[in-house]
Amino acid sequence: MIWNEKIECMDRQEMRALQSERLIGLVHRVYNNVAFYRKKMDDMNVKPSDIHSIDDIVKLPFTYKTDLRDHYPFGLFAVPMKDIVRIHASSGTTGKPTTVGYTKNDIENWSEVLARSLTMAEVSPDDVMQVSYGYGLFTGGLGVHYGAETVGCSVIPISGGNTRRQLQLMSDFGSTVLACTPSYALHLADALAEHGYSLADMKLKTGVFGAEPWTENMRLELEKKWGIKAYDIYGLSEIMGPGVANDCPYHTGLHVSEDHFFPEIVHPDTKHQLPDGTEGELVFTTLTKEGIPLLRYNTRDLSTLNREKCDCGRTTVRMKKITGRSDDMLIIRGVNLFPSQIEHVLLEMGETSAHYMLYVDRDNNLDTLELQVEMDEGNLMETIRDLQTLSRKIQHALNSAIGLSVKVTLVEPKTIARSEGKAVRVVDNRKK
């Protein structure tokens, strides 16, 4: 199924012509209406008249999350407040939140790209979608909600939390699609029996999971536990919210709605644009956004781009599934480590649950790494020797995969805190 065949299957030359036209208009708008960008461009000796096509995007300045926080709350808005119909904000875990504003056109475009995303995940008007992303200032709940209504689904706006109620309504209302973070979907699956339910009580067939990095092995685990097809939805509040990209049934990368969000991959250090197929930091320019348009916003997410036509028929550029961020990378004794590498090893072994925590510390100026991982309830060890054997097995597998010695501690099921939103996997005590 394809929601907007004209755009999603557009010839590459046509797409570049559309992107060029929209970029030229965008640059004039931000230069004339946003003092921050006018100063940035003036400092670089760049004028709107210097931008003739999408290829000229490399002449433009980058934008970072700190820029949004420095201009809190509305300093990067490009339209007067009377034209802003909605305001969202991301969590301010390191200080002020990042604030984003939407015009009526922005909301309509958001609903459109989300309709594309959900259709890619084989969601149709016949579905009952349970939206378990948080509603409110977080963009997840309302964003997916509007997209689902655009498709024509029956929407259950349950928001996050209250596991018992989630499962009760999933059963009673016959939910066929679940939208939430992958870690919360895993938690709900693990809680089925505890609350008196089984898969036979559920009609779920599709999961649309996002808002945190997750591995291909996690997708397979969720598909097995729920008996569903699991899809990855990508977005971030600064760019629009969920719906920037989504994977299709072929799972060979997430299709970007590139008529609205132009993607680039840049080198993490030099910030130079990298060729397709090379991993680097993912950067987006919001070609059509009116409320708070952004030039070359560096997401810090690590990915690659692929512009070949997909087997699903879409020609839109595909980004590789995000499994980490450049600023989430841990450096342990000189070795670069992403939490997703740990998840990959655990799920590939399949002898524990997928719930874990990493604790990084420093002992006598030497970095230490401890992994606490929950035992699988269906595979509990009988003796201390069994526990020691499994711990050593996991240690060996991790050492082979990441080149680091890791202290592995097996803990009882349901002892690691669950998250109703984005999962917290790392505690780095070196920063304290």
Image (cartoon, rainbow, N blue to C red):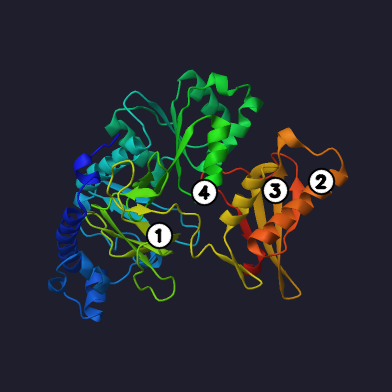
Q: Quadrant of the C terminus?
A: bottom right
Residue at the far left in the pictured view: 49
Task: Kindly identify which residue carries mark 2.
Answer: 387
Task: Kindly identify which residue carries mark 1.
Answer: 304
- Residue 347 placement: quadrant: top right
Q: CA distance from mark 4 to mark 2?
A: 27 Å
Sequence-wise, which precedes: disc 3 or disc 2? 3
Note whether residue 241 is visible. no
Task: Kindly identify which residue carries mark 4.
Answer: 214
Q: CA distance from mark 3 to mark 1?
A: 31 Å
Q: Position of residue 309 (x, y in %)?
A: 30, 49
Q: Tell whether label 2 touches label 3 (CB within 8 Å).
A: no
Q: Classify 414 as above or below 97.
A: above
Sequence-wise, which precedes: disc 4 or disc 2? 4
What amino acid type is highlighted by mark number 3? Answer: Val
Q: Which mark is residue 373?
A: 3
Sequence-wise, which precedes: disc 4 or disc 1? 4
- Residue 354 placement: quadrant: top right
Q: Position of residue 226 (x, y in %)?
A: 54, 31
Question: Horizontally, is 409 left or right of 425 in the view?
Answer: right
What amino acid type is highlighted by mark number 2? Answer: Leu
